[in-house]
Image: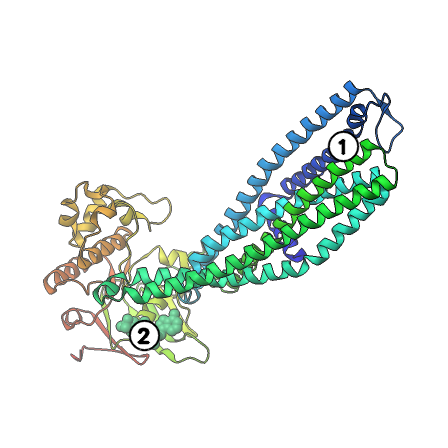
Amino acid sequence: MTARSRAYLSLMSSTAGRGAVAGLLSLQVVVALMEGLGLTLLVPVMQSLGGDDELRLPGTDATLTLPVAFALVLLVVVVRSLAQWRVAVVSVQIRLATVDALRLRLFDGLLAAEWTYVAGQRRSHVVQRLTTEVERAQTALVMLLRILVAVPILAATVGVAVLLSPLIGGLAAVGLLLATAATRRSVRSATRLGQEMSRGVADLGAAVTDSLASVRLTRAHDAGRAWTDLVEAEASRVRGIRTSFVRRTSAVVAGLAVGVVFAVMVLVVVGRQAGLPFAELAVLVVVASRILATAQGLLGAVQVFANEAPALDQLSDFEREIEQHRQTGSVPGRPQEPAGPQEPLVALRGVTVRYATDGPTVLDDVDLQVPHRGLVTVWGPSGGGKSTLLDVVLGLVPPETGQVLVDGSPLVDLSSWRARVGYVPQQTVLVPGTVRQNLTWSLQPGREVADEDLWAALRTACVDTVVESLPAGLDTPLREIAGLSGGEQQRLCIARALVRDPELLVLDEATSALDTGTEERVLGQLLDGSRAVLLVTHRPAERARADVVAHLADGMLTVGPDTGRS
Ligand SMILES: Nc1ncnc2c1ncn2[C@@H]1O[C@H](COP(=O)(O)OP(=O)(O)OP(=O)(O)O)[C@@H](O)[C@H]1O
């Protein structure tokens, strides 16, 4: 609990700035001092109500007149209100800055992490961490800030009680310490329930995401019941955890209320026995009710903090994991050696890839050359390593042994290399936005493309007439073209890759949904002598027009004339 609070405080300091956090803590001390002073000033006010002529401030020899006492009370309330207002504003600023920074740090880290690590992540778990867990961490922050306000106020209130009656104040302090010790168990159980909650919410999110991903198949097989049952089971687990937490928390807070009311009764009896004057006794009752309210709020905040803070553990572990998989080998800005005229655009030399150290060899001592112009096709059985080969060429998967050479030099500057490449993956990727945004979102920063170049790319990919027929052409929002066929979507993705004006176009079965005639036309236009095309395909007709045909099976690559196997 204390370690987590420290972790949160250091997180807030590192994101919102030490100054802001120190300022917030100072403001909270001001609020607490004003609380204590305000309660102390109630004593002379009570004395005047009791008919005393000489109004005294407890703990001092100072005497006051009623107007002075009222003026001081007013001043204290004004200062306290201003400080509280500032605390509210600064707390929100710190909280939002912290949460946004945390989310962005994770997101950026993930985008820059090694490809094999990113590809191995379950999407629903990543979404859950970047949304639900970050929100839970935010709730924990709200609670921590509430605790940081309540603790000094509680200390100031107990201080006033001690000032009024050291015996009663001392008893109140001891009572609070005992209550704190008694709630340790419930705090531990809140933490355990919070950890279960993280797992429950992750599983619920996964069930919903997976069911949506398979909605077409679910409908076709009329298998919705299977998903509904799973989602209901996961939701009921989450419901159980939440209910159990609220049951325990409320019981502890209610128990505290009973304890404090009993303590107030004891206080009145003890106070009367000790001959405490009416004003002091009345203010002590007010102080006791303030202690009750603050302690109840504090206890509730501590429990919720304990319950939500495991989200921060999850996020910290996730961030550490991402950090361990930070992509290495990229030296941004370092120019590639000038190309020797005889060097291929990209070459693999003795490349071996395994996804796990004790796993199977996916690429085994592979050699391949892609010239600056023309078509290289790769074909072979499913699972033979074709996509992995492309990932190596793209610099996504680093070889365990062997080299990737670009223009004859080892590939070290990944960002320069990627600026020269256009890639169309096996699954089409269209993002929410207009056709234009879909064509341009993956352009290098600062690069502008004229409309005529967009149309040229659409023409080359044989999808220009489809876009022309849309209501607003390039500016048609994607939701209005959700009905694009699989082949039209593939061609749009090819156009997007072409807009980057790549020297190498990497196509992973990117024409698989096209009819033979359209595929022939697209390929013919792509091979206009201005670029190299590296194509994974199962179709003999495409192999027939290739300059290099490579067959990949069980990780072994054979380059040579097409044997006609299919
Ligand atoms: N990220 C990964 N982690 C672990 N294993 C992987 C990963 N990606 C691919 N593999 C495994 O590597 C092998 C080759 O996969 P790859 O996707 O390269 O084959 P492929 O020839 O492109 O298959 P297909 O034609 O079916 O798309 C397969 O056994 C696959 O399970």
The reply to whether callout 1 and callout 2 are in contact (CB within 8 Å) is no
The image shows residue 342 at horizontal and vertical percentages of 30, 66
Q: Amino acid at mark 1?
A: Leu
The image shows residue 188 at horizontal and vertical percentages of 63, 61
The image quadrant of residue 468 is top left
Give the residue drawn at x 30%, y 51%: 431
**Residue that badge 2 annotates:** 385
Q: Residues within 10 Å of mark 1 (few under 14, many from 20)?
A: some
Helix, strand or loop under label 2: loop
**Where 40 sits versus 422, above or below?**
above
**Residue that badge 1 annotates:** 37
Front tag of 1 and 2? 1
**Where 546 sits versus 260, above or below?**
below
**Spatial distance from mark 1 to mark 2, Cα to Cα?**
75 Å
Give the residue drawn at x 63%, y 58%: 187
The image shows residue 294 at horizontal and vertical percentages of 67, 43
Give the residue drawn at x 36%, y 57%: 418
Q: Residue 151: give its label.
A: none
The image shows residue 31 at horizontal and vertical percentages of 69, 35
